[in-house]
Amino acid sequence: MSTNGHIARDESTFTVKAGLAEMLKGGVIMDVVTPEQAKIAEEAGAAAVMALERVPADIRRDGGVARMSDPEMIRGIQEAVTIPVMAKARIGHFAEAQVLEALEVDYIDESEVLTPADTVNHIDKWAFKAPFVCGATNLGEALRRIGEGAAMIRSKGEAGTGDIVNAVTHLRKIRSEIRWLTQLGPEELASAAKELQAPLPLVRQVAADGKLPVVLFCAGGIATPADASLVMQLGAEGVFVGSGIFKSSDPERRARAIVEATTHYADPARVAAASTGLGAAMESIETSKLDTEQLLSPRGW
Amino acid sequence: MSPATGAEQATGRPAPLVGILALQGGFEAHERVLRRLGARTRQVRVPTDLEGIDALVLPGGESTVMTLGVEREGLKEPLCRLAAGGTPILGTCAGMIMLDRAHLGILDVLAQRNAFGRQLHSFEASFEVDGVDGGPVHAIFIRAPWIAEHGPDVTVLAEVDGHPVAIRQGRILALSFHPELTGEDRLHRFFLSLAGFGEPTAKET
């Protein structure tokens, strides 16, 4: 047998950071605000939980400044479950991210759902050992975040609404811009990078691979199993469900149903079965009826 | 689907069909490696997907999610039947956990989940794996398990920190790490050789 008593090891390389996202693929990441909810999410088949103080629907309703969660609550959730625990830091608030790293959360979400702390700069995510996931509404935004060190991207959608329309818009935009890049000649990529406001090396990589260099999930507005199937068919590699589960009438059942529909997204009969008898979805808001200043997805630069 | 591949032409045998459990996790990365090696692949979500496969991969991901999925889909019994019938199986990370006594009960081992700690302690490393020729294997460990206990029929192929991270029992290989993420294909070639396909890269032990 090969014994490797004390081998040299590299922690927190980009491969290791992006690798965890690879292992979350095909899964559902659920927002939870208590250890009890985290337990329910895990038992219903969540691939990870996002620990936060208020789900986006409540943040939207309550207003005020939304910040990183209380470390005590995050620790409570870490103790309650064995699956990865993610937590949110404000855009640009690197000190909140440092706290989350000190708590050893498995992924940090630099999130537009919280109130931004910097109107110009995002966190320098290369400076951290913990991996980051960031939101994006288009390819340029996704590549800027990856350029800053994000190891996973989620399309933003419009959190806390239960309205899937923006998630669809953002996913379609990212995917169509990727397809566009693959059709360009090498001499056209610098100009494309300028247009996308994205780093040229990443633009070249996407043009060559026809995909983002990291895993792409969908977030913001998923409320039903059919919503999950829709975004998976549009190219999402997994889903975040925020308010959609614990703001519905039967969270445990809905959580299981969305997990099932995410696995069997391409099988309408299975999505139909999963959609049956779930009770009421979350109370929803039509995104187009919101004022511009109420939108969360334009946050981030 | 791969057409006739180099490997197939070389052996004159049809490319093996490898089922990859696709309830959740890193199944596409295995698909890419296996296709590159000339195998055909099929994603497995329900019991009928197992029909006619020559080998099976249980990928990384979350073992809690896969356990619930196996239960929901009624996959436990058919998976155990395949293993008992001698179908070669490769389990990586969560797949190793799924094979242990506390889950599918296919291997005479007990895996310890998240044995190296949370994500901050995930790592890459290179080390020798018994029987794999050609130098150290480059491995990536992500919230990885190790083998805490094992029975006499289990051969340990590599250890890290004094704990088994690569083992073999008959035609079943279980790895704590992810060869599918590092461009490493020798362990997949070894796995395919157990299905009678291609040249073994590891000596029969």
Image (cartoon, coloured by chain):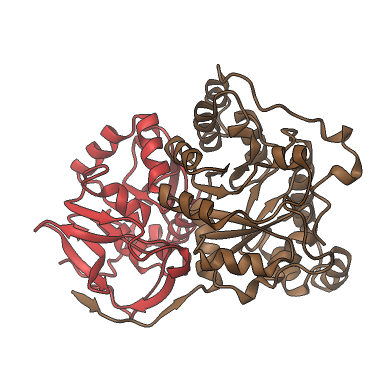
Chain colours: A brown, B red
Is A275 positioned to the left or the right of A147 in the image? left
Height in image: A139 above or below A31? below
Extreme-top residue of the structure: A277
Residue at x 73%, y 74% (from the top left corner):
A201
Height in image: B23 above or below B156? above
State how many labels appear. 0
Is B71 positioned to the left or the right of A73 in the image? left
Height in image: B112 above or below A191? above
Extreme-left residue of the structure: B152
Task: Please tell me which residue lies in front, B67 or B112.
Answer: B112
Residue B180 image offset from top left, x and y in percent: 44, 62
Q: In the rendered image, is residue B13 in sight? A: no
Task: Please tell me which residue lies in front, A155 or A90.
Answer: A90
Q: In the rendered image, is residue A61 in sight? A: yes
Residue at x 84%, y 73% (from the top left corner):
A190
Residue A223 image offset from top left, x and y in percent: 65, 32
Is A267 positioned to the left or the right of B47 in the image? right
Residue at x 49%, y 39% (from the top left corner):
A41
Which quadrant of the view contains residue A28?
A: top right
Which quadrant of the view contains residue B112?
A: bottom left
Residue A158 image offset from top left, x and y in percent: 76, 42
Residue A128 image offset from top left, x and y in percent: 59, 73
Residue at x 53%, y 47% (from the top left corner):
A49
Task: Please tell me which residue lies in front, B4 or A150.
Answer: A150
Is A26 positioned to the left or the right of B117 in the image? right
In the picture, the quarter occupied by the C terminus of chain B is bottom left
